[in-house]
Image (tube, helix red, strand yellow):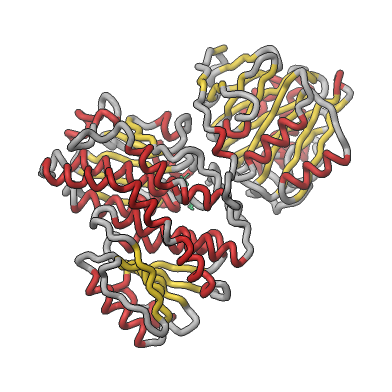
Amino acid sequence: MCGIVGATAERNVVKILVEGLHRLEYRGYDSAGLALVDGDSAGITAYKRLGKVANLENALKENPHDSHVGIAHTRWATHGKPSETNAHPHLSADSIALVHNGIIENHAELRDMLVAEGYEFVSETDTEVIVHLVHKYFQQQQELFKAVKSAIAQLDGAFALAVLCKDEPNHIVVARSGSPLVIGVGIDENFIASDQLALRQVTDRFIFLEEGDMADVSCDQLNIFDVHGELVEREVVQLDDYADASDKGQFRHYMMKEIFEQPKVVAETLRGRLGKHQVMEEIFGADASSLFDRVKRVQIVACGTSYHTGVITRYWLESIAKVPCNVEIASEFRYRDVVVEPDTIFITISQSGETADTLAALRKAKDIGYTASLTICNAPASSLVRESDLVLMTQAGPEIGVASTKAFTTQLVSLLLFTLVIGRRNGLTPAREQEIVSQLNELSDLCAKTLELADRIKEVSNHFTETTSCLFLGRGMQYPVAMEGALKLKEISYIHAEAYPAGELKHGPLALVDSETPIVAVAPNNDLLEKLKSNLEEVRARGGRLYVFADVNSGFSESDGVTVINVPHVSDVLEPLIYTIPLQLLSYYVAVLRGTDVDQPRNLAKSVTVE
Ligand code: M6R
């Protein structure tokens, strides 16, 4: 969602803040702003601009500024439309400045209380109540840290925040509850951010604040207090260098770079996890074996693309591991009455590890008696990783494009490993496991071969530029693949797209079929191919335009109204991994032709840390 960055240093911090905002822009991007302490407590100067960080950067070029302490923010609107007034930082009496990620649920009542006390509100945001609260308590307590502590005690909801004070110009006070916050540790300089990626240009040493932590950050001192107000030491983590994550290299967009990284990251996700004949189950952690012995059922919860990973996993778990599996969207799961069956493992899937609904679902699951929790995640220091019993990290590396691509394929790989480990407790023979393991060993090459379809798909994408609506069809495991294809297309090209199990066409969607609506079909050469072909005949008979992503051996031929894209042959088990790739490419090329903002599509954010 929104992004926070802050710095306190002996050098000028303006460039550091702007670079940090650029790196965070993938999270939210309707406006940006920063507040700087003018030396020796002369005051606080704030700049805000609507739109992208570049607009703020241009404003700063016109008004160069020198400051040693500052906070900055890139916003993704929740309360109040995108506007300069609603952009952060928010100020109170020109003496306190504050940036905030998250949502304050009791903001309306706090606003009424503060208005009654004489505070004037200028924005429609929930955040503005916090800055006035801090100001109110600062008037009483004359100490910023204490004032922030008193203010947050009044808040219901989720927040990560950073606060500056004109009268205490040498430090930043930060607090986290429900939204991530990290401190970047430097030499005679310290930084804060909502995501360590924002600070990779200045440090590789990080402290990940825990729930309820507050910190007082100046250039030569760092004091962290836990939820009980006790001074605590938190581990300083040195992160590996993944500097190339924020570099597009030869590619025009991060999304394309990330699609093309799939052979590499699939191999990374398998590295060190496969023995000669089987998956090494120690990869799930020391306690995993005994916990897995008890597993009789699986409950998966996730959102968006990660939810589609879950739906595919259900097919694997029930066919290969013979274990019943239920999959649910996190925002639904968290608010319904759930009957927990005995011996059920609870699995969350998430690229960011901070998705608010998925995290809330995990917390609920821990309260209601699941046997254990496992997360499949791509962000090592994230809340989901910290709060789950077992973890299997995907090794996708940072994914910057809002549209999830390489995170999806590496999630699938990870959950196939889980399927095999559970399966061997349920009659999966060593020979069958070995067969799937050898297929996995070939997967990276097969992904690379599939990417060779890029030019052909680019050609085909021309047929979609004027499209307003599109159907994606698949059967069996290809139905969730079709769901993911439809999500990708709508997300970045703004074309309405829906996925259906092909057998469901005649129960309603067939009425949509005409020569204007492209129908994309996912057609590997498997047991359901003949059934799918009959469904596609129904479409052709009604004049529908078909685009079939078909196995080279599946016997489709091109004709008027039928375009066939031949996909390399792949085993049944790995079909979803391979067939997803051409659909990613299709959505990418269509979006580029339609001139949308591919990496930062409108209204969306990379990390959805609000409900
Ligand atoms: O970080 P997560 O995997 O938990 O995020 C879940 C969804 O927000 C995410 O997959 C979203 O649907 C993507 N933008 C899809 O490309």
564 is higher (above) or lower (below) than 399:
below
Q: Residue at x 21, y 46 (%)?
A: 436
Q: Residue at x 18, y 34 (%)?
A: 294
The quarter holding residue 315 reads: bottom left
**Nearer to me, 482 or 225:** 482
Q: Is residue 268 left or right of residue 71?
A: left
Q: Position of residue 475 (x, y in %)?
A: 29, 66
Q: Is residue 38 left or right of residue 301?
A: right
The quarter in which the N terminus is drawn is top right
The quarter holding residue 149 reads: top right
Observer able to see residue 109 = no
**Nearer to me, 516 or 3:** 516
Q: Position of residue 431 (x, y in %)?
A: 11, 44
**Nearer to me, 158 or 154:** 158
Observer able to see residue 207 = yes
Q: Is residue 600 left or right of residue 423?
A: right
The quarter holding residue 100 reads: top right
- Image mark count: 0
**Nearer to me, 238 or 506:** 238
174 is higher (above) or lower (below) than 3:
above
Q: Residue at x 45, y 53 (%)?
A: 304
Q: Is residue 306 left or right of residue 55?
A: left
Q: Position of residue 34 (x, y in %)?
A: 76, 36
Q: Residue at x 40, y 69 (%)?
A: 472
Q: Position of residue 120 (x, y in %)?
A: 81, 41
